[in-house]
Amino acid sequence: MPVALTQLNIDEVLRYMGCPPDKADSSTRALAEECAAQMLRTATPRWTYRIFDLGFEEEGVRMGGLLLPGEDLKAHLTGCGQVALFCATLGAGADALIRRAESGDMARALALDCAAAAAVEEVCDRIELELQAMFPGCFFPFRYSPGYGDLPLTLQGDLLALLDAPRRVGLTASASNILLPRKSVTAILGIAQSPIERKNRSCLGCPAHDGCQYRKSGGHCGIS
Amino acid sequence: MEFHELLKAPGPILLDGGMGSMLQAKGLALGEYPELAALEHPDWLREIHRAYVEAGSQIIYANTFGANREKLSRTGKTAAEVVSASVALAREAAGGRALVALDLGPIGQLLEPTGILKFEEAVDIFKEMVLAGAAAGADLAVIETMTDLQEVRAALLAVKENSSLPVIATMSYEERGRTFLGCDPASAALTLEGMGADAVGVNCSLGPREMPPLVEELTRWTTLPIAIKPNAGLPDPGGAGYDITAEEFAQSMADLADLGVKLYGGCCGTTPEYIARMKAALAGRTIRDIPRNVPAAVCSGSCAVPIDRVRVIGERINPTGKKAMKEALRRGDVDYMLNQALEQTGAGADILDVNVGLPEIDEAEMMVRVVKAIQGITDAPLQLDSTDPKVLEGALRVYCGKAIVNSVNGDEESLTAILPLVKKYGAAVVGLTLDRNGIPKSTEERMVIARRILDKALFYGIRREDVYIDCLTLTVSAEQAGASQTLEALRRVHAELGLKTVLGVSNISFGLPARPLVNQNFLTMAMTCGLDLPIINPNLEPMMAAVRSYHLLMNIDKDARDFIAAYGDAQVSTTITAGKAAPAPAEAGARDLGKLVEAGLKNEAGQATRQLLAEREPMDIVDNVLIPALDRVGADFETGRVFLPQLIQSAGAAQAAFEVIREKLSGQPGRETDKGTIVLATVKGDIHDIGKNIVKVLLENYGYTVIDLGKDVDPAAVVEAARKHKAGLVGLSALMTTTLKSMEETIALLRREQVPCKTVVGGAVLTPEYAAQIGADFYAKDAKESVDVARRVFGTT
């Protein structure tokens, strides 16, 4: 499914670049703006989803026959009877654009990479709104991805298989669980019939905060 | 009846419909492997195959779509046993009433450059399936639902090299007319027909109503029969099915007969009912016979370039006479070539010549590396330039698209060694009008050689349109009569043989003053004589201006669109300064190079360095201007006064300065800038290399020689490079928790092999504690710290 992307939050792009927005000089901001625009022209965002009933078990939660092990997601989805599993990707063109810049201009490559990170987030925000609109009157904890808390990255391949993602949107996972094309996300959105304790979407509150690979690289996982 | 007889018979050929959706309807559970149906649910599979045969399918696809070793890795079954059982079962169900196809679907892992799967490994994965499928009695192979042309090539090569099965190759497109990975029907058609597919087409992705534009585009670029196997309309986004009925499907498919489609089937969501109704709908229809006039053309995996006007071949990726490129080749620095590629396409080159021949390097290995790297960053088609068949074959294998092979000559030895490769990989070929007797002086003798090359190419089954003749430019200062002979030969090849022509233009003026003028005029004269493919330096504006003017004046550039787009705002000066060349305009005083580096001004830094070199020694500039400036930026970065983007921009400016200095120093032995050699790699399984690349730029700025092994690097390759280059430091990067294991293995192997080097590790998931635990000597938290580590290892001077 296509999803339209029209603009990116430049402050967000600057933050990903490791530059506090209020301290960015004009040339850095201009670079971020130019690269954001170029990324928007190049990316071809696609997504797909499926709705599953959710089962709670000793070792974790189960959806579509697949066990999602661990305590954190289980706690996170308390009160949810269903989940929307979705994935989104900016497509191979975004990767190619970054690769092209890397051979000659690393500052540009960094800005494009960060613009892509911001774009994936933006796409996920829009998808989340669309999914929420399909379940009027329901309640939703924030979306949750493998690698967050104790939910293992090794699930990526199984999640993509449940979504038929390689065929539907061209998204795959490598043997080391890297999503390819690179600028992609898989996420689980809980769906509850009655109000749930809405947890703060804060990076600090995350159980994985200390060792988080996303945070250390100047980005984040798509949750906060 | 054999597949080829079916193709020859008039009327449509009916394929089968969906398999996955049929298996699910029979009760296949979510999470179960559909590939194992022949072993686990043979009755279901038999019923499905039979239902398709009864509905009218003349070719059924065995259930081998995903039966490759990657997808089967967790099932405990081998590809060979699953493929054998599936093909045998399909044959039994067909009972001689339909042909059985070995179905080759995507491996499920993306190939380089988007993914990490190597081309040869992909070929090997398909080979296993092909051997089993052919042995089990498949009548043909189908390659389907592909989104990466390179993966189709791997499958097609596997079929051709390991069986004699005919092949249908179909790809899956989006409505914008490209696959997920950017392949267009033109590139697919040109490439796959060249490599010997028997039919090409479209499957999956869209419904039959979306097929006409794709079919029309395919028929423009191939003479092969077209196969169409769409879904039952467009999918419901939530996975609930497809949106058109069997009757609607049948009617839309039947309409494709008017577009000349030969093979008809269905993909996801279609059932035997869809095929039965489609058969009925096609019953009264005649397949229109549309004449196909496929032009001479080349392509990459995503861009077709028809030779229907003058197309510029960029000549810059060639070490002849280029010190800096020779230096880059010796260092194995592919970035140099990549920059040349981008610069030339930016200037308007349509095709890029790639020549990496240098006596002291392994040309075959370097050619493969460079071709792969260039394909990763540009979609311009490539001209593979070598006379060594081994080099050419290596490059042709990994090249995705229809390349040009440069070149063969009129000698039997050259023709018999290279033309079979051109045929096998579906390339076009440049024939030089020379032989063992040298370049003939007369036009007539050149025509004789051109004819000989053409005849031999036709003999090997190469299309006439794919033979380009190079009539050869002679330096006019040495042989003044040569130019007119070359032009006359061009005219005759064009008129009498009807072949496309190639010509390296720049040599004409060697040894003369005002070379650009001579080159530009000769180019214009040659185009007027029918030159299609000038090999020039597109960065020289007068050359591109000649090409654009030619297109304008010959009414090829309609409404002068391209010309105005290029020169609408241009200030043109035609003044030629006679006599001695005027000195370069003096800059308004040499600006402080250090300041320019701090400000991150690339171009200015390069210029300032050039001026500074007039007064100061190269190493003095490095040690007393560049490095102190970088140190100041580094210190500001550490204290939070500047941030990563500025640090990188400063590094970029210093790099520009460094290139100027390196140019000055090259060829002066003992005066290298080298302060120590560092091998860098992103570890096996990991592909996040932006951080490593930033580190590389910074280290180079400080005068270290960096051997960059790229991403997804095998531990053994790190050991080999560290040994070969006598590296004092090895830097490893990993960004995933799942790839830290590879980092640990790499360090362990370096130790076990007793490579005398220190190791430094970095990457988002690493901590100093973990670095120590896996035996790394140093941990660097960012690019700046990696420089500090290098200084500790090599000393500060």
Image: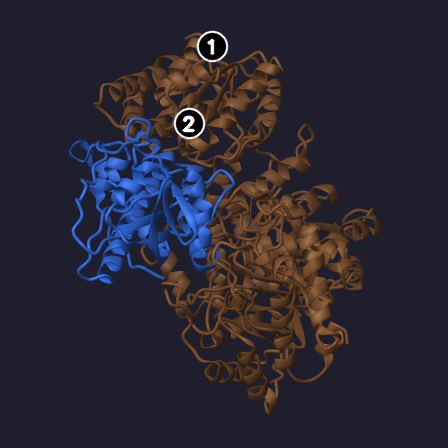
In depth, the one of B580 and B719 nearer the eye is B719
Q: Secondary structure at mark 2?
A: helix
Whether residue A17 is visible: yes
Q: Say which of A171 and A146 sits in front.
A: A146
Is B113 displayed left or right of A88 in the figure? Answer: right
Instruction: State the residue position of label 2.
Output: B697
Q: Locate the N terminus of chain A by quadrant.
A: bottom left
Q: Amino acid at mark 2?
A: Val
Please say if B352 is above or below B732. Answer: below
Name which quarter of the figure residue B721 lies in. Answer: top right
Residue B435 drawn at (x, y percent):
80, 49
Look at the picture and state if B612 lies above or below B577.
Answer: above
The colour assigned to chain A within the rendered structure: blue
Q: Residue at x 67, y 48 (%)?
A: B78
Residue positioned 72% across, 77% down in the render = B97
Looking at the rendered image, the quarter that the C terminus of chain A falls into is: top left
Locate residue A75, reporting x and y percent. Answer: 27, 40
| Residue B482 seen by the camera | no
Q: In the rendering, what colour is chain B?
A: brown
**Crowd tier of the residue under label 1, counting other residues whose Cα lies within 10 Å: few below 14, some 14–19, many 20 or above:** some
Q: Which residue is mark 1?
A: B794
Mark 2 Cα within 10 Å, few/some/many (few <14, many 20+)?
many
